Image: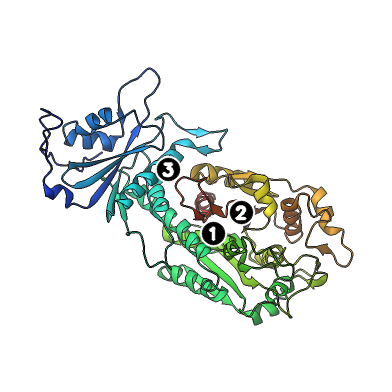
Amino acid sequence: MLCPFRKVLLPWASRQGRRSFSVSHNYWNAKKGLVLGVYEKEKDDESLHLTEAAECFDHSVSGKLGELLSISGPALKKGKSRVFYGVHEDFSSIAVVGLGKRSAEVCGKENWDSSKENIRAAVSVGCRLLQDLELGQVEVDPCGDAQAAAEGAGLGLFLYDEFKQKKKPAVTAQLHGSTGSAAWQRGVLYAEGQNLARRLMEAPANHVTPTFFANCIQQELSPFSDKVAVHRRPQKWIEEQSMGAFLSVTKGSEEPPVFLELHYKGSPDSNQPPLVLVGKGITFDSGGISLKPSSGMDAMRADMGGAATVCSAIVTAAALNLPINIIGLAPLCENMPSGKATKPGDVVRAKNGKTIQVDNTDAEGRLVLADALCYAHSFSPKAIVNAATLTGAMDVALGSAATGVFTNSDWLWSHLHKASIVTGDRVWRMPLFRHYTQQVTDCQLADLNNVGKYSRSGGACTAAAFLGEFVTAPHWAHLDIAGVMGNKDEVPYLRKGMSGRPTRTLVELAAALSTEP
């Protein structure tokens, strides 16, 4: 690693007395911070284990950093931190963060790469500490994995405060040193992609309407117009496509629906079968006539989380210039009650001709996805992956630990699982038994019922079985992201609020598929 420091003689460099040093004002005028990592001591080894960048820094200050760490308290454990001031003239504050064991690796029990997760969590802690000190610029130790460090910095510093008069100071995070610059930039793009989804999900529904959502994604994709085509399909087009299930959800709202269609042409082979990503885009879900309880209904501004993560993943794929063709489909609308709204018991016809008895208008996500999945088949896809904040039952089953995945393809599951281990945004496979299909096909008035016959049992599974009735492709996966929609304190490098998960896993999936023949 190239050391970014020049040798600097500090007032205490002689080590002739810890209380005799003084700090001149120019140290504090730097207003720039530095995040450095330290590993936990291994068994029977009492020596201090700094990262390569931290060792270089310690050498530049004649060992003062190591001395401060040894006298300021116990050894730093994973996720813990300590801030020092005036140690180096280029940095007014230095946050040292605990990375856990140097030997951390992929953990089969946890289904993630512990080393990467430790780095993300530690770097985010350090960056936030320096943000609280109102430093405008922070340099970050790559900690042996520059991409994970960049993700931790970018995700950890994100805060949605667009409508607040008092805002936290903006912080620019950059790589410390020159090692891993390409990986760092990749991590920056991964984090920016997830943060785009977080912004869309967190913003109030009176601002993020279907039209606004489409405008935002079109603007984000505008720098890549040479490889991306954006089609904003209006209601007339939706009607021409016979998307009766989607239209039935839109009827109660004054906001016009939009069927957003994105084409990213990254492969040099224009005939390469595309990966099709489909996202549920309910920009506000009141439940319709089957009205939700008022408590917590405000969170339903994020019921377009599937569309937000899918579209953000395509923006990121374009920024990374991934050599793969991707098509994104996002049926966007509101689900509202009115005199024109769909009523419980109504029967509607989907694009593939199947009729649906709508017994619960709050089970609307599967209706908009049904038509979008039918349309997805027209592109002869390599695989179809849909994401949706679909069922509260998924939250009950897995909580925020992992996205539930229902798939008819072991090949696609393997790729999703491997991608999630890399990103730390985990997935868990759920069943697609015929047992659940029978519960939605046993219907009094139509081919299908939009809720299972035993509505309180296996709700996430019956919803997936319903979607399966609109899929004939051999490689399809349904991601129920209801449980991971928000974050309280479960993911340490995400603040409280909407999570934007699993954007990075979708990007990692696309990156993996781009290397396949």
Q: Quadrant of the N terminus?
A: top left
Residue 224 percent across, percent down from the top left:
42, 67
Give residue 481's mark: 2
Q: Secondary structure at mark 2?
A: loop
Residue 102, quarter of picture: top left
First reached walking from the N terminus: tag 3 or tag 1: 3
Q: Nearer the viewer, mark 1 or mark 2?
A: 2
Residue 317 percent across, percent down from the top left:
47, 58
Choose between 15 and 40: the one closer to the eye.
15
Amino acid on which the number 1 mark rests in the picture: Thr
Q: How many marks?
A: 3
Q: Secondary structure at mark 3?
A: helix
Check if mark 3's residue and mark 1's residue have beta carbons within 8 Å.
no
Residue 381 percent across, percent down from the top left:
63, 60
Residue occupied by mark 3: 121
Check if mark 1's residue and mark 2's residue have beta carbons within 8 Å.
yes
Task: Give the distance between the C-alpha atoms of the residues marked 3 and 2, in whole angstroms.
Answer: 22 Å
Identify whether 211 is placed above or below 486: below
Is the residue marked by circle 3 packed among few (<14), some (14-19), or many (20+) residues within 10 Å? many
Residue occupied by mark 1: 309
First reached walking from the N terminus: tag 1 or tag 2: 1
Q: Secondary structure at mark 1?
A: helix
First reached walking from the N terminus: tag 3 or tag 2: 3
| Residue at 54% over, 68% down | 262
